[in-house]
Amino acid sequence: MELLLLIVAVVAIVAGIAGVILPLLPGTPLVFAGLWLLAWLDGYVRVGGVTVGVLGTLAALAWLVDYLASALGVKRVGASGLAVTGALVGAVLGILGGFIGVVVGPIIGATAGELIARRSHGQAARAGLAAGLGFVIAIVAKLGLTFAMLGIFALAWLV
């Protein structure tokens, strides 16, 4: 049974790393679950509760970055509140559209929100571009947080 749980933990971590890049998989939550399971299997001897708490905080931060990056990018280019709301709604509804929906949802939402608010095609295009760029920045930030989680876990395990 312990070997099976060890395999589940490793698969969760590997799938989570893939999920950081592939939007349909819950990347950092899977990485956290796998790391937590490894700590639990070891009886929290090498990786204690404080370290698991830090890992959980980093996973929650990565999840937050995922949803806020597009909206913050849109806000940064001076788009309207409707464009920011559109990017957030597009990110959430995009989940229903699979991989393409997750990528394109915030862009469409920000563009539509800006068109409704200002009817300016140029500003709407900037808002959509900012939402797309925010998505890319979110992936980079999530990768950084994920590797920080793995590094913290490895240090706690080895030290």
Image (tube, rainbow, N blue to C red):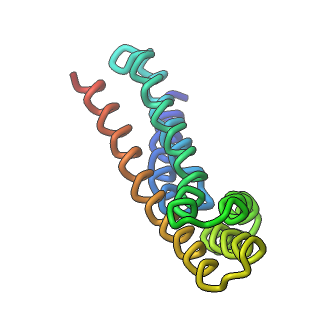
Among the 4 quarters of the image, the one containing residue 44? top left
Residue 74 location (% of width, % of height): 57, 64
Q: Quadrant of the C terminus?
A: top left
Between 120 and 6, which is closer to the camera in this rendering? 120
Q: Which residue is at a point 57% across and 60% down the rendered structure image?
A: 75
Q: Against 35, is 130 above or below?
A: below
Instruction: Tell how many labels.
Output: 0
Towards the viewer: 121 or 101: 121
Residue 11 screen position, x and y as percent: 49, 47
Residue 93: percent from left, percent from top: 76, 62
Closer to us: 52 or 11: 52
**Above or below 48: residue 55:** below
Q: Is residue 71 left or right of residue 116?
A: left
Q: Residue visible at 75% across and 71% down?
A: 117
Left or right of 58? Residue 115 is: right
Q: Is residue 142 above or below residue 33?
A: below
Q: Note whether 95 is above or below 28 in the view shown.
A: below
Residue drawn at point x = 40 percent, y = 16 percent:
48
Q: Which quadrant: the N terminus?
A: top right
User: Which residue appears farthest toward the bottom when viewing the image?
Assistant: 121
Residue drawn at x 60%, y 70% as measured from the top left: 103
